[in-house]
Image (cartoon, rainbow, N blue to C red):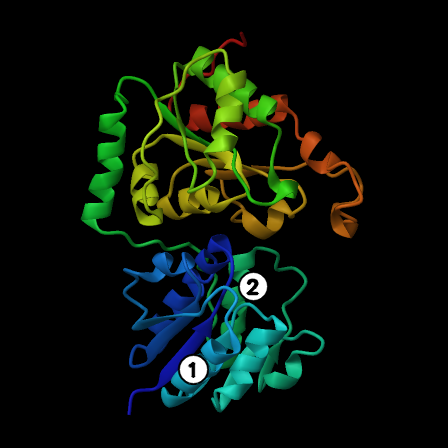
Amino acid sequence: MTEKILCIQLKQIGDVLMTTPAIRALAQSLPQSEIHFLTQSPSDQIYRHNPYISKIIKIPGKPKLGESLKLLRQLRKERYSTVIDFLGLPNTALISWLIGAKKRIGFKLRGRSLFYTHPIQIPTHLSYSATHKLYLLSGLNITTDDAKLDFYITDKERNAGQQVLKKIGATQNFPVISISPVSRRTYKIWPAEYFAAICDYLAECYNAQILFLWGPGEYHFIKKVKDLMKRPSLPRYEVPTIAETVGLLEQIDLHVGNDNGPMHFAVAAGVPSIGIFGRPLLKNWIPPNSKNHLGVEFDPGCKNDCFYPKCGLECLRGVTVKTVIEKIDFLMAELGYKKPSRP
């Protein structure tokens, strides 16, 4: 009988993407196992073409009692031997216990460890989120340092990304740089005027073609930046799917944006990137010791003891345009573009 393993990670796209190194390591270490993944839409798209996952199970964002009971019955019927809770919330810890798996692995957290047979204490020297999730596999005696993110897409989705650039008139004569000033979290939104200054700098100094990235209901972030720009950007286009966005990112030279989904997609696609951080800690979300994926943050003295929302988000406004430009110049030089004279 094939051993079935259930992995749980709900919520945000970036958090789900951070589980991909652990899933890869799990599948490669236990090739005879069948791995299922419990998550929520639209994060399920991350695993739609992942070769290591046999089944994706979706849970509603706010499930009703009847939906929860139906899901629980479905999970119990699978007779999982092992559950790995990559999220560690009270509800996911409870799910881990209720479905009846003999081995239940999760983070050693107060009030939740009781639900696990293997509560894992993450060493303090590990900070990157993907590394945290990888370390949970120590409960199965699996160890690896390979924290590379995976996002598998099809040729159709890759071609769709290429067609976006073709339709909006992007050329190969000048660099295409994607900008994503969006976020649904106030403490992640770098000021629009700062993004406008960055876009104008890129256009003036590198003749860059500015490609904005946004999701459904987020174009108002883009309009605010464009209204403040002196230089034009590439025209608006129909919002692609998440996988098509990854296909689009594979075609561009550099990505600059808030700490959001597109930033993580750029990392997964191997595109040089710069992430701008407010409240979240840079070290938790940028691959350690990476030369191609950089982050910028400012600590006004409270990042490790945050009291948001009782603040003026000094951590965000403290990230200067000059600091981001320095990172841009570094990566553009790495890409072979001559460092310009400042305008």
Q: Is residue 264 visible?
A: yes
Seen at 53% across and 25% down, the residue is 224
**As drawn, 61 above or below 128:** below
* Position of residue 270 measured from the top left corner of the image (x, y, whole percent): 37, 43
Q: Nearer the viewer, residue 97 or 69?
A: 69
For marks 2 and 1 on the same chain, the one whose residue lies earlier in the sequence? 1
Q: In the image, is residue 322 above or below residue 187?
A: above
Q: Amino acid at mark 2?
A: His
Q: Amino acid at mark 1?
A: Lys
Mark 2 surroundings within 10 Å by alpha-carbon count, few (fewer than 14), some (14 through 19), many (20 or more): many
Q: Nearer the viewer, residue 184 or 68?
A: 68
Which of the two residues, 62 or 31, is positioned nearer the viewer here?
62
- Where's the N terminus, which quadrant? bottom left
Is 35 above or below relative to 233? below
- Residue 36: x and y in percent read 36, 75
Q: Residue at x 34, y 42 (%)?
A: 245
Mark 2 sits on what residue?
132
Query: Where does the image place residue 220, in percent across and percent down from the top left?
Result: 50, 31
Which of labels 2 and 1 is toward the front?
1
Instruction: Please give the name of the residue rendered at 55% of the width and 25% of the height, measured from the top-left corner.
Output: 195
Q: Residue 55 vs residue 37: left or right?
A: left
Residue 83 is situated, as x and y percent measured from the top left of the image, at 47, 80
Q: Which mark is residue 301?
A: none
Q: Is residue 227 left or right of residue 216?
A: right
Residue that carries the numbered disc 1 in the rendered image: 70
Task: Find the distance from the CA under tag 2 to the CA under tag 1.
Answer: 31 Å
Residue at image coords 65%, 75%: 108
Q: Secondary structure at mark 1?
A: helix
